[in-house]
Image: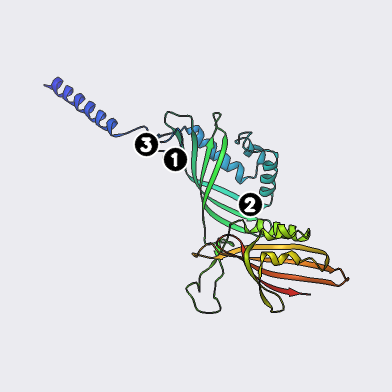
């Protein structure tokens, strides 16, 4: 009787083990992006990859660039990026990366390896700047287990000195946008202004025209308002011997949660010398309004001698 009972127990344990094993899988998830990996699942990586990420975070926090770079593949960091990262870390009074979740993953039936890490990061710069971030980061590894690609997503802590949005729009009249904050715009406005200024300094009218809409409005520092067409720029330099426009700052912004139209605040210094020898020399604060096509549709100017 005891022998039979023992057999029943062994059989029951075997059934239980098979049930547990059948309910657990060694892979999961799926890659839904394009390429050969489409539809493939993931498996967990190795403890070594987890330890590597923790060691990388330690070297980063200690600003130990020699050790830090040892975790990067040679084709990931060239001489310039090494120099830039070293200088950036050196600009910090202290910096701490504290991982709180690390998940190494491999592509099933493939050679793709990555480590996903969630961490708290605090940056105190020598110039007094402060950042506190909650980061989710992807470290893609090569066959040797070194980082060959990196991406980062962040949530900004309320203790930060800087934000992605701020200020407040009022408008001259009450409208739906009143009270909304501003955000930085990123439709290549900065480069367009830089190219526009470069063409201006060369007295290159055709180069200047690239920045403008077919028709645009100018409100100058004397309060004069006028509408122009691109062709009207052809005579802009006719009375001038030379010009020099030096940029001080470019700030492209737009009202949050509105269409893509933006305004670019340009601060600079300009000097014009006429063919008669008269000198026009002023500090300028100008706002260039970009339409939905990314062209300057109007400009407002303020000046100081």
CA gap between label 2 and label 3 equals: 39 Å
| Residue 291, quarter of picture | bottom right
Q: Earlier in the sequence, mark 2 or mark 3?
A: 3
Side of 297 relative to 116 (left or right): right
Q: Residue at x 78, y 67 (%)?
A: 270
| Residue 59, quarter of picture | top right
Q: Position of residue 99 (x, y in %)?
A: 51, 45
Q: Earlier in the sequence, mark 1 or mark 3?
A: 3
Quickly name the residue at label 2: 94
Q: Residue at x 42, y 38 (%)?
A: 31
Side of 112 relative to 95 (left or right): left
Q: Compare residues 150 and 67 and report the one nearer the observer.
A: 150
Is the N terminus in the top left, top right, bottom left or bottom right quadrant? top left
Near mark 2 (Cα within 10 A), the count class, few <14, some 14-19 or many ≥20, is some
Q: Position of residue 251 (x, y in %)?
A: 64, 63
Side of 37 relative to 286 (left or right): left
Q: Compare residues 86 and 290 and report the one nearer the observer.
A: 290
Near mark 1 (Cα within 10 A), the count class, few <14, some 14-19 or many ≥20, is few
Q: Secondary structure at mark 2?
A: strand
Quickly name the residue at label 3: 28
Q: Earlier in the sequence, mark 1 or mark 2?
A: 1
CA gap between label 1 and label 2 equals: 38 Å
Q: Secondary structure at mark 3?
A: loop
Residues at badges 1 and 3 in contact (C-beta under 8 Å)?
A: no
Which numbered tag is attached to residue 33? Answer: 1
Q: Secondary structure at mark 1?
A: loop
């Amino acid at each position: 009787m005891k022998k039979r009972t023992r057999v029943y127990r062994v059989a029951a344990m075997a059934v239980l083990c098979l049930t547990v094993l059948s309910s657990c899988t060694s892979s999961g998830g799926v890659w839904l992006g394009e390429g050969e990996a489409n539809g493939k699942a993931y498996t967990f990586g190795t403890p070594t990859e987890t330890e590597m990420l923790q060691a990388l975070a330690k070297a980063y926090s200690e600003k130990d660039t020699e050790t830090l770079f040892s975790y990067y593949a040679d084709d990931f960091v060239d001489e310039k990026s090494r120099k830039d990262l070293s200088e950036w870390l050196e600009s910090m009074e202290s910096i701490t990366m504290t991982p709180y979740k690390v998940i190494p993953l491999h592509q099933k039936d493939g050679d793709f390896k990555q480590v996903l890490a969630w961490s708290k990061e605090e940056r105190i710069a020598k110039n007094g700047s402060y950042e506190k971030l909650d980061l989710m980061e992807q470290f893609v590894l090569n066959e040797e287990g070194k980082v060959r690609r990196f991406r980062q997503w962040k949530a900004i802590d309320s203790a930060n000195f800087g934000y992605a949005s701020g200020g407040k729009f009022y408008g001259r009249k009450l409208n739906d946008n009143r009270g909304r904050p501003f955000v930085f715009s990123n439709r290549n406005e900065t480069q367009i202004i830089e190219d526009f200024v470069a063409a201006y300094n060369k007295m290159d009218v055709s180069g200047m025209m690239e920045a403008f809409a077919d028709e645009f409005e100018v409100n100058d520092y004397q309060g004069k308002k006028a509408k122009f067409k691109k062709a009207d720029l052809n005579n802009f330099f006719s009375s001038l011997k030379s010009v020099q426009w030096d940029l001080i700052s470019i700030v492209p912004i737009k009202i949050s949660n509105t269409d893509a139209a933006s305004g670019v605040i340009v601060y600079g210094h300009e000097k014009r010398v006429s063919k008669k020898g008269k000198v026009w020399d002023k500090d300028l604060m100008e706002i260039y309004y970009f339409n939905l096509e990314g062209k300057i549709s109007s400009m407002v100017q303020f000046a100081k001698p």
